[in-house]
Amino acid sequence: DNGGTASTGIDYERFTDTKLTFAPGETSKSFNVTIIGDALDEPDETLRMNLSNEQNVTVATRTNLGTVVDNDDPPNLVVNEPRVVEGPKGRIGAGIFTVSLDNPSGKEISVNYADTKNGSAISDVDYQAIDPGRLIFRPGVVTQPLRFFFRGDDVEEEEETITLRFSNPVNVVFNTGD
């Protein structure tokens, strides 16, 4: 009972040797494998079962492959709203948007990001424009930093905002609002 991608004791309970007895005229039998549920969104996994010690029959296919179908929802993308102090004219500072998943995933996750330039902060005046890119979360990784740089000035002003847009999500869910 193994040899597939599913793990004994993690994805399914170990099963002991099961004897299948066919009555005259019967052509198929089945047996149950207990699946261990989890909340991890992951690829479907396989479970290899071998038939052996047959009596009075020829086994055509000794190794059989079953599939443990994943039924867990993908994680949600969460982005913090960093607050930074602008400082005096000429000062260059750095801030970080922390892009997180609300749950770990067993799948690779990716999402595109872009600066909409629609926030109240002015691109290339108040902050350095954020080049479009793609964040990739390897399986098990739950946070990715997205660094930005801002410029200080001596102008008395209200709080300013930078607005990012995320698109083309793979294996993750998010709201599409700004």
Image (cartoon, rainbow, N blue to C red):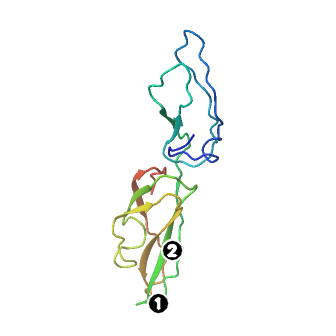
| Residue type, label 1 | Pro
Check disc 1 and report the residue beneath it: 88
Helix, strand or loop under label 1: loop
Residue at image coords 65%, 37%: 15
Q: Where is residue 55 in the image (x, y as percent from the top left)?
A: 56, 22
Q: Quadrant of residue 72?
A: top right
Q: Position of residue 19 (x, y in %)?
A: 63, 27
Q: First in sequence: mark 1 or mark 2?
A: 1
**Relative to 158, residue 75 above or below:** above
From the viewer's perspective, is 19 left or right of 153? right
Cα–Cα span, label 1 and label 2: 15 Å
Helix, strand or loop under label 2: loop
Q: Quadrant of the C terminus?
A: bottom left
Check disc 2 and report the residue beneath it: 159
Evaluate whether residue 74 shows in this view: yes
Q: Position of residue 177 (x, y in %)?
A: 46, 53
**Relative to 30, residue 11 above or below:** below
Residue at image coords 61%, 45%: 8
Residue at image coords 51%, 20%: 57
Who is closer to the viewer here, 31 or 160? 31
Who is closer to the viewer here, 67 or 27? 27
Q: How crowded is mark 1: few (under 14 residues within 10 Å), some or many (20 or more)?
A: few
Q: Quadrant of the N terminus?
A: top right
Q: Residue 166 carries which label?
A: none
**Relative to 7, residue 131 above or below:** below
Residue farthest to the top, as pictured: 25
From the viewer's perspective, is 117 left or right of 8? left
Who is closer to the viewer here, 161 or 79? 79
Q: In which quarter of the image is residue 91?
A: bottom left
Q: Position of residue 96 (x, y in %)?
A: 49, 73
| Residue type, label 2 | Glu
